[in-house]
Image (cartoon, rainbow, N blue to C red):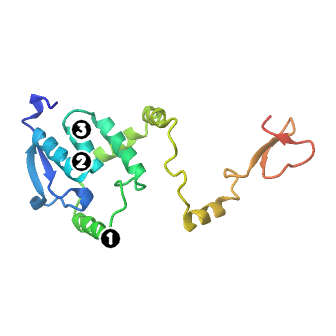
Amino acid sequence: MISNSTRVSKHKHHIIPQYEGGSDFAENLVELTVTQHAMWHFAEWQRKNRWQDRIAWMGLAGIIGHEEAVSQAITESWKNRDPRVGWNHSEETKRKISQSQIGKVIPADARSKMSVSAKNRCTPEWRERQSRKLKGKEARNKGVPMSEEQKEKLRKTAGHPNKQGWLWWTNGSKTIRSREKPGPEWRRGRK
């Protein structure tokens, strides 16, 4: 339910959504009340079944808070393999997005807010919440074949001591990492 106190505020809404390549130019913006904005996203969600509109509607309607909306957006985008925007854009959409960004300058106050927001997302509390939420869920890349580029990157890092194949060995007084048993008196593990 939308509270009466939010009905007076106005929002600028993109007629063609940014996730479809819509610009920030005046001809693509319409001013709506919070209620109208929520209803617009609800109607778009019903029509297109896009998760972006569902999350926007739920956030604007007060069904979920900002933190939950961000969390759901991250989860949805992970499902679609492109964490920046939630799916892989067509070349035409990429071109439209690129064109809409030409000449834009991000104001200093907006850059400052973006910086604070990024820092807040990386707090230990946030990491703990994400960890609890994802506990027991299957990895999003499980069963996804690796590209040749990914395989080559793994091959290049295989000799690094922090990578797969290196084991801890101890002789009781000393501990080392090695791919092979250093000698007969050595056993697996740390001292």
Which labelled disc corresponds to residue 59? 3
Which residue ends up furthest to the left in the rendered image? 8
Residue at numbered disc 1: 91
Quick check: 38 left or right of 152? left
Picture coordinates of residue 163 (x, y %)? 67, 52
Quick check: 84 left or right of 13? right
Q: Give the mark, 1 or 3, whose residue is nearer the N terminus.
A: 3
The amino acid type found where label 2 is placed reads Asp
Query: Is there CB contact under 8 Å for labels 1 and 3?
Result: no
Residue at numbered disc 2: 53
Query: Is there CB contact under 8 Å for labels 1 and 2?
Result: no
Q: Check the picture and name the quadrant holding the C terminus.
A: top right
The amino acid type found where label 3 is placed reads Gly
In percent of the image, x 60 and y 63: which residue is there?
151
Give the distance between the C-alpha atoms of the residues marked 1 and 3, in whole angstroms.
30 Å
Depth check: 131 or 51 in front? 51
Crowd rating for badge 3 (residues with CA inside 10 Å; few <14, some 14–19, many 20+): some
Picture coordinates of residue 2 (x, y %)? 14, 32
In percent of the image, x 13 and y 59: which residue is there?
28
Picture coordinates of residue 141 (x, y %)? 51, 52
